[in-house]
Amino acid sequence: MDIFLQQLINGLVLGSVYALVALGYTMVYGILELINFAHGEITMMGAMVALSVIGALALAAPGLPGVLVLASGLVVAIPVCVALGLVIERVAYRPLRHAPRLAPLITAIGVSIILQNVAMLIWGKQYIPFPAILPQGRHTLYGASITDVQIAILLLATAIMLLLILMVQKTRLGRAMRATAQSRQVASLMGVDVNRVIAATFAIGSALAAVAGVMVSAYYGLAHYYMGFLLGLKAFSAAVLGGIGNLGGAMLGGLLLGLIESFGAGYIGDLTGGFLGSNYQDVFAFFVLIAVLVFRPSGLLGARVVERA
Amino acid sequence: MSSALSLNKTRSRWLTFGLLALGLALLPFLVDAGLGRSWVRLLDLALLYVMLALGLNIVVGYAGLLDLGYVAFYALGAYVYAWLSSPHFGLHLPFWAVLPLGAALAALFGVLLGAPTLRLRGDYLAIVTLGFGEIIRIFLNNLNAPVNITNGPQGINLIDPVRLGSFDLSQSHALFGYTFTGIHLTYYLFLLFTLMVIFISMRLEDSRIGRAWVAIREDEIAAAATGINTRNLKLLAFAMGATFGGLAGGLFASFQGFISPESFNLMESIMILCMIVLGGMGHIPGVIFGAVVLTLLPEALRYTGDWQRNLFGRIYIDPADLRMLLFGVALVAVMLYRPAGLLPSTRRRREFADAQG
């Protein structure tokens, strides 16, 4: 029972991070029908920038409380990621908005290669440890343990998602985003500045990615120039699982994928009689992705028809 | 008059053909003399990539199915070769038995991957195939316990070279008074296979099947309406592409003598895709050009290390790191400025001109 509860906690924490990244994919896809392949790398950039700031601050002012240091890392990382997202949209995607579908996908791959290698040139190939600035508290709950960091990730992710839903449902920008997602042309006829809405979507997605990047590196205790690739792929799987283009779907998909991964890794050894071990953890996301696309391409919550010509 | 003209044309065509054949036959010796032995090895690799790129070109260029997991078929071909002719399982089957087996297994997996993904559109298909490639790689990486099938991340070593009877292609041989080293002989072997792949590609392009693929690429619904069996033809495209991938994989394993999952990561898939996109999708000369340029470019970039040392007295950026960065930049730049590729087919150039205007 305690193993079950432990995997549940791990899965929820991991899943809420996936959900944050998945939101970025799903928002862009909802509006542009473009898989922003570089989104995972933006997450990685967020983690790297924040870690650099945190590392420098922890050295310069060792007395500062950890939460404050972390917050200043985020304060720097979020604008950097937002700027990155905006530049990428402007340079690599906007000129190709009317080109054949393959073209923007390939530039997206190109951008993600560029970001990865720039990060490698700046921060090197080694793993960067997350400085021990955060409270290391650990609580026991019916035999399972949960750390302060995990609690913080859960709370913060929930708060951000609630805010995002509020924004999309209640504000003018949110309404413009929903209108643009339904039909770019009609929205622009109604006086929506479509280019601004698209830019805003990229900005919001990138900010979420920055937060998620910091969470991941705090959770695993390290960051790496290549971390964005797998994370992005899993988050994209989560977005597809929930129904791409659907905000609630991305959150649900993220949480589900986190749970599938942690339970899968926890129980695969018993299920296969020890033939496959927890080192297959990364495979689950891909199997889920393929299964969803084959059996229910619109995802769990998606009502959109995917098979358009 | 017209017959004389066509005779002239035929003659000049044969002349070009003859010159090309002579050039290709002499190329390794010229390169060896001019640039050094390591470049002959690169020539072998370039031929390997031409095969891979032409294989992927069938899937992406002709049928318009964006496949980002192509390297999985390459890996399967290589591992089949390694399993059946290396000390790993103690099997040493001859290459003419193993190569077709690897290609066939790759084709089978091509169909297995194709079947469930037939309904998917462009970018969804890309992600699923990418996932498939990663699944294969993760399994290759982990299937060393409890039963050691792939030897895990260490890979499989001491793979047999290509042997015809007692004629070992990896050794030097004296033929017709000249000494042919292993890499020279490998060049001719690879050239043979490459020419075969080119020939098949060309014949496919002009065939009923090839035109059906183009129709599917342009508009699947219209293609189905004209009576094309889109399901079977898409599966055939996957299978054909995978076959070439598997073949190249087997050749790669025999050439290197060592394979590990490292060689078959996503970057490799993307690199092969870059070759097609940069060269000109669906256009055989373009694809060959792209494959050769992208194989040789990293080596040429190695000289930037020397330039840096000469200019600044030290190396700021490792040329190997620079290479991937430049790949990314090239991908974006070509898509933005020459979306049809550097050597596009006339049809494609017109399509893109229409799309712009």
Image (cartoon, coloured by chain):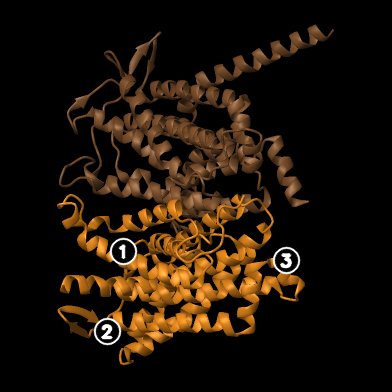
Residue type, label 1: Ile
Which chain is tinted brown?
B
Identify the subunit bearing mark 3: A
| Residue B323 as seen in the image, left or right of residue B250 | right
| Residue B168 as seen in the image, left or right of residue B52 | left
Q: Which residue is mark 1?
A: A260
Marks 1 and 2: in contact by CB < 8 Å?
Answer: no
Where residue A36 sits in the image (x, y, percent)? 53, 62
Check disc 2 and report its element: helix, strand or loop: helix
**Badge 2 density bin: few <14, some 14–19, many ≥20, Cα 10 Å:** some
Residue in the image at 19% along x and 55% along y: A271
Q: Nearer the viewer, mark 2 or mark 3?
A: 3
Residue B156 appears in which quarter of the rendering? top left
Residue A289 appears in which quarter of the rendering? bottom left
| Residue A286 as seen in the image, left or right of residue A25 | left
Up/down of B298 relative to B35, above or below: below
Q: Which residue is mark 2?
A: A148
Residue type, label 2: Asp
Depth check: A49 or B124 in front? B124
* Residues beneath discs 3 and 1 located on the same chain: yes
**Badge 1 density bin: few <14, some 14–19, many ≥20, Cα 10 Å:** many
Q: CA distance from mark 3 to mark 1?
A: 39 Å
Up/down of B38 relative to A148, above or below: above
Residue in the image at 47% along x and 49% along y: B306
Where residue B189 sits in the image (x, y, percent)? 41, 21
Identify the subunit bearing mark 2: A
Q: Which residue is mark 3?
A: A185
Check disc 1 and report its element: helix, strand or loop: helix
Identify the subunit bearing mark 1: A
Residue B278 appears in which quarter of the rendering? top right
